[in-house]
Image (spheres, helix red, strand yellow):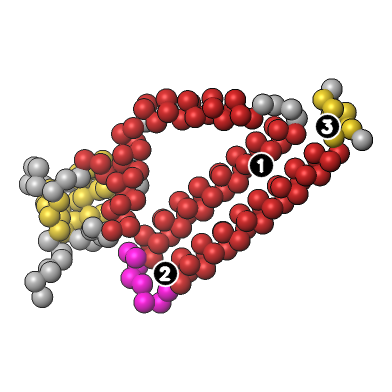
Amino acid sequence: MNLDFFGTEISVKKLIDSALYILFVLAVYLILKRILKITFNKAGGKKASPAQKQRIKTISQMLSSILRYLFLIIVLLVILSILGVNVTSLLAGLGILTAVVGLAFQDMIKDFIAGIAIIAENQFSVGDTVIAQADGFKGTVTNIGLKTTEVTSDKGEVKIMANHNIDGLINCSRNKLS
């Protein structure tokens, strides 16, 4: 048995199979989301400092967002497949588009990856006193984002550094000799 959907014939079997596939993907998505939430809640427990809690929250939100977008893309591709769109050529086109966008936004992507590394590796935290070796700028870290880091000097000057340009930063707030 076939259904007519805006001039496109869709078999009921294909529709049911696709619905079951979407339900399966939804179940996997919800399970992974729950696992992420439990994992990050345990990591950001009572013993975590406010800076660690902020770092965990940032990473949690980022992974949750990536997971949500993957789910939506899969559902969209299944729906397009039901409607008779050649998904294979669409995926190839998306691959090319991703490469073009990646080249256009490579500095932003570098900043994003460097920001994740700074947060994940706990290289410095908000409140740490740092010195930029390149120009000798000394100040307190006031904000760490995925794209930029802000350092404020004693005079109130604010230096905003792209995360991928942070090289040779001396953290004066940590002493490893103890």
Estimate the spatial distance between the alpha carbons at disc 1 and disc 2, rounded to whole Å.
Answer: 32 Å
Q: Nearer the viewer, mark 2 or mark 3?
A: 3
Q: Which residues are magenta?
A: 45-52
Q: Residues within 10 Å of mark 1 (few under 14, many from 20)?
A: some
Q: What's the mark number on residue 44?
A: 2
SS at circle 3: strand
Quadrant of residue 165 in the image? top left
In front of the other: 53 or 1:
1
* Left or right of residue 98: residue 111: left
Q: Earlier in the sequence, mark 1 or mark 2?
A: 2
- Which amino acid type is marked by label 2? Gly
Label 3 Cα neighbours within 10 Å, binned few <14 / some 14-19 / many ≥20: some
Give residue 14's position: percent from left, percent from top.
80, 39
Query: Is 10 left or right of 111, judged from the image as shown?
Result: right
Nearest to viewer (mark 1 / mark 2) = 1
| Quadrant of res 4 | top right
* Residue 75: mark: 1
Numbered label attached to residue 10: 3
